[in-house]
Image (cartoon, helix red, strand yellow):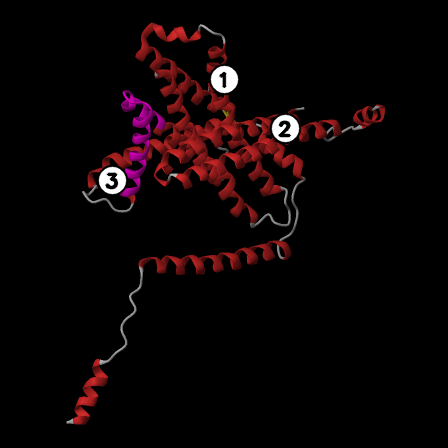
Amino acid sequence: MTQLMLLAETVAEGINPLVAIAAAIPMLAGIGAGVGMGIAVGKSVEGIARQPEAQGKISSTLMIGLAFIETTCIYALFISILLLFVV
Amino acid sequence: MQENVMQNKENVAKKPKKVKKPWQRGRKIAFWGMIVCSILSVAVFLIDKFVLGTTKPPMGDVVADEVFPHTVFTLFGYDISMAVLSVWITTFVLIVFAIVFRFVIFPRFKTVPTGFQAFVEWIVGAFAGMAKDNVHGYSKALGPYVFTAAAFICVGTLTEMLGIRPPNSDVNVCIALAICTFILIHFYGFKHKGPKYLGKYKMVIPILTDIAVPVSMTFRMFGSILSGFLMMALVNNVLQPLTPVLPAFCSILFTCFHALIQSYVFAVLSLSFVAEAIE
């Protein structure tokens, strides 16, 4: 632990290594987003297969749902960019 | 007599002509187009690697220069950054297109649509149908608003292909669009329900949900378009060996895809939230 702190202090220029590690941790949110999107698309394809005439409504609902899931991942990306370029 | 008959039969029995189907020409163009593009890409890559010199600035400076907003010029004492200039350019392009369309192209529409007219009719019909499905009574005002916002986002992000920073990569533009939607949601809620509209705030949770709506809309647009711009900046400057060729392929994914999806999502979400406030 003290070695990490010494390393963070001795970096004169460039990116602080602790900041670099901290900028990578939020992107673990991509795992949840990917799994969630896969499940959503799978269920919607099942729904279309059961009832092909409902394809328009199912596609629209799928698009809205995917937008919400993607927003969560974009929040994490935003924090990551903020850490890298401002801190 | 028999020789004449033989000659007539030879003249009559020709091979039947092959009827060409209309999509075979498109397939031929696509196939040869792909081969020509691959050859050109390899040629450009080899020329850049072996003929031109490799003197490119260090990567961190270039990317940081492009990401942070810096002022282009000052006007009446206000600093104008690249994103504000981009808003003006997008608005100018849209207004010029609208004027030219209304006075030159629109009077020439035919009863049976072909080509560009069919495309315009399809898009306007799609947005008007979406507005009518979601918001029954107020689709006369909301349909055009949603179409304008979607066109602004789409055209604005497509200017990124020319090297201009897209307008939605600045937080202020995204907040402005989200606030417009926020105002419209509550305006139509009051108009439809009267003062009873405030009755839904008896519990505390609807207050938080209603504040979360414009915040999430802002960051959805800002994050996705800024990340597309950042990826294009990285691909243009950092991946040194592949720099001449890769941006052409990546820009389709990061720029065009984000433009279309974000404009469509903004339109659909605005209509959904107004529909939820009305019912």
- Image coordinates of residue B90 in percent, x first then y, are 41, 32
Question: In the picture, which quadrant includes the N terminus of chain B?
Answer: bottom left
For the residues marked 3 and 2, what is the alpha-carbon distance in whole angstroms?
47 Å
Q: Residues within 10 Å of mark 3 (few under 14, many from 20)?
A: few
Dot 1: few (<14), some (14–19), or many (≥20) neighbours within 10 Å? Answer: few
Answer left or right for A33 relative to B269. right
Q: Position of residue B252 (x, y in %)?
A: 49, 43
Magenta stretch: includes residue B121: yes
The chain that hosts pointer 2 is: A
Residue at 47% from the left image edge and 30% from the top image edge? A65
Q: Which residue is mark 1?
A: B212
Residue displayed at 40% across by 34% down: A58
Of badges 3 and 2, the one in the foreground is 2
* Residue type, mark 3 in image: Ile
Q: Quadrant of residue B177?
A: top left
| Identity of the residue drawn at 53% across and 37% down | A38
Q: Mark 1 is on which residue type? A: Ala
**B237 sits left or right of A17 in the view:** left
Q: Determine the CA span between mark 1 and mark 3.
A: 42 Å
Q: Residue furthest left?
A: B1
> Please, which chain is the residue tagged with disc 1 on?
B
